[in-house]
Amino acid sequence: MTSLTLIGAALRRRKTRTFLTFSSVVFAFLLFGLLSMIQSAFSMGVEIANEDRLVVRHRVSLFQMLPQSYEADMERVPGVVDAVHMTWFGGVYQDPANFFMQSPVEPAEFLDMYPEFQLSDEAKERWISTRDGAIVGRATAERFGWEVGDRIPIQPTIWTLAGRPETDAWEFEIVGIYSVSVEGGDETQMLFRYDYFDEARSFGRGQVGWFAVRVADPEQAAAVAAAIDETFRNSAAETKSEPEGAFAAGFANQVGNIGLIVTGILGAVFFTILLVAGNTMAQSVRERVGEIGLMKAIGFTGARVQRLILLESVTLVTTAGFLGMLLAVVAGRGMSAALSAYLPGLALRPEDMLLGLGLAVLTGLVVGIFPARRAMRLRTAFALRRL
Amino acid sequence: MSETDSAGNGPMVEARGVVRTFRRGRTAVPVLRGLDLRIADGEFLSLMGPSGSGKSTLLNLVAGLDRPNEGEVVVGGAPIHRLSERRLAAWRARNIGFVFQFSNLLAGLTAEKNVALPLLLTSFSGAERKRRVAIALEIVGLSDRARHRPRELSGGEQQRVGIARALVNDPALLVCDEPTGDLDRKTSGEILDLLAALNREQGKTILMVTHDPEAAARGSRTLHMLDGQLSATAEAEAVVA
């Protein structure tokens, strides 16, 4: 017989009420887990962003194009080591639902700029020597069952083929499957050769979407970004340069302020939980005034009774919270498989799990503190009259 | 008014000049007005009186559940009116066994766990706790009902479990507030037999508040309370009876 036995008995006292409160807390933390996963998936690009890389885009918006010739101009800006360009292709495979990012790049330069993209030497050579060769991330290859050597038709939504009907698909040969060495890295992209793309597209030749620029000294990144923008000031296509992390955050914010949305939803959920669980604990203590009086009569101090009530509250909320987070992990695995094309890196991070457990303990304390203080202050002789 | 013991032993309880006044809004309601009481070690004292006469207030003071506004309460040599809340709680855990009108067992715990409740406040080993619980249940004749929950026990059995819980720390003083008030006559008789046996065979000092003259008669002495005073006339009548 320990204090935990007493807590178990108290929680079993009104089984239906405890079950309903427990369930509401489980669902609240399930929601917390799922929303945390979505938030972290959106911010993944920010977290894995490289400090020595800038992204340069059109000053007006990401959807305005820039001349490919800017690449050479940028490489002449002091502090710039290298620059590569990318372009949003926006094609689909067989069905509009089969969406994933594709971009034309210059293979060797791209792989130098992004060393976290892991590709075998053999695949690199094939990519450089195959005009319509493409590499795809492991997640996308697994999703569609693609293997090296397969020829893949990609239906354009923007970049139609020159001299061909708009409905004609681009064809690529899979020459390699890449993985990303950074945890949470995007393994859903398809990358193909820019020269093939530029020659075959029906419009916009010589135009690219954005540039990635490596700077010599990350400490000087802001100054280099300003210098790049200064270089193209008053030109037909002015630029906006920013650190890769800020670019990724801005990209995510085009969907909306994910952090604010998630915080708002969770705030409402946890406020409701405070009311639900708080009401349960308050009712429970009110019903047990006689029992609490008995415990104090036989020698339990007010402080000890307060600790027991608090422990009861924390046990209820933390156990339910932990279960909710476990369910979120399980549900997250299913969601991750279904949404890998749209939200790569969807998983509950250990730090979010710890945050959730901390939140559960805190909620338990907040919910229990007022009934516990009431129980502590209860006059024993008065309470015994309620027996 | 001073009381002398009938058993000729030293005092277990000694209350001197006890005043207890409660406040209802702005009105002071005096309940005990300079009361003196002496209960000898090993005595079985019955306390009778009409509702509102101050019986429960006196019982609370003797048991260390309340403190007097004036006067002294010394129990087993300890001046409990001077103890802090924390020390008083620890003192109650060691020295007082409570038996109430309703057994007020915790519904979610078995009989043996209800009996073990006061032992949570001790440093006894697990084995010692088990031993004490077994002895307490043996004394009240419920060894075979140890694993039953309160709802599986009769009213009399529940009250016996309550008595076992009061005994498990081996207190010198048992404070009983209407212990048979919720029981039928036959079961009441069994509970009173048990209390009398604890007094007689184990030397427990018992202070029992009751409305029932037959129950009171099982004690070695009966006192009557009226308007916050122990009534000598009533006491004498009770003794003669």
Image (tube, coloured by chain):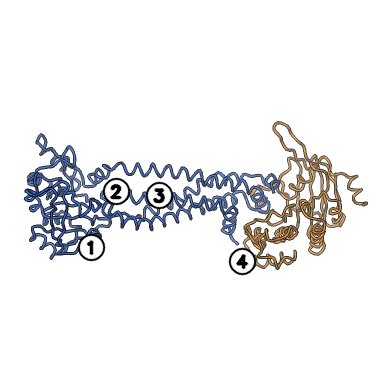
Chain colours: A blue, B orange
Q: Is residue B30 above or below residue A135?
A: above
- Residue that mark 1 sits on: A145
How would you rate the neighbour count of disc 3 (Cα within 10 Å): few for under 14, some for 14-19, many for 20 or more? Answer: many
Task: State left or right for residue B146 relative to residue B240.
Answer: left
Task: State left or right for residue A38 relative to residue B207.
Answer: left
* Whole-number angstrom distance, CA of label 2 to CA of label 1: 26 Å
- Residue that mark 3 sits on: A32
Observer-nearest of A200 and A103: A200
Chain at numbered mark 3: A
Q: Which residue sits at x=50%, y=52%?
A: A22
Chain at numbered mark 4: B
- For the residues tagged 2 and 1, is the chain the same? yes
* Whole-number angstrom distance, CA of label 4 to CA of label 1: 62 Å
Amino acid bearing label 2: Phe
Q: Which residue sits at x=16%, y=38%?
A: A59
Amino acid bearing label 1: Gly
